[in-house]
Image: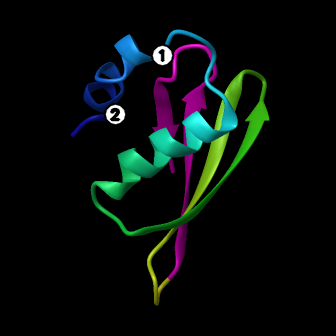
Amino acid sequence: MRVTEFTEHYDDKLEEKVDSSKAQELARRFLGQYHSVIDTKAVLEDGVWIVTVYLGFSNTQTKQVKIDVDSGRILGYT
């Protein structure tokens, strides 16, 4: 699933700015499609939530998901 397909599904539900818990939920659902999500942490920088997602149980990895604070769109991930 592409990033745009995933975030378009949530557009109707987002009526106000995305808070930390909503950003973490979006990142969990997005990466949870393919990975086991252990924990998340969100930091707001210049109108973009940077959500660090910790993946895996035995071989822990981290990914960062960037989410727009106004629209809730996932801008990218690394």
Find residue 3 and name its label. 2
Looking at the image, residue 2 lies above or below residue 73: below
Tell me the number on the disc at residue 50. Answer: none
Q: Residue at x 51, y 23 (%)?
A: 72
Residue 48 on the magenta segment? no
Region in magenta: 60-78
Q: At 78% across and 31% down in the image, what residue appears?
A: 45
Q: Are marks 1 and 2 in contact (CB under 8 Å)?
A: no
Q: Position of residue 19 (x, y in %)?
A: 67, 29
Q: Residues within 10 Å of mark 2 (few under 14, many from 20)?
A: few
Residue 55 drawn at (x, y percent): 48, 70
Left or right, 49 with reference to 15? right
Inspect the image, locate mark 1, and give the three-letter code of the amino acid beneath it.
Leu
Type of the residue with mark 2: Val
Residue 58 horizontal/vertical position (percent): 46, 90
Q: Nearer the viewer, residue 56 or 64?
A: 56
| Residue at numbered disc 1 | 14
Label 2: state its secondary structure.
helix
In this rendering, is residue 36 above or below 25? below
Mark 1 and mark 2: span between their CA atoms?
17 Å
Q: Is residue 25 left or right of residue 16?
A: left
Dominant SS type (magenta) = strand
Viewport quadrant of the N terminus = top left
Which circle, 1 or 2, is nearer the viewer? 1
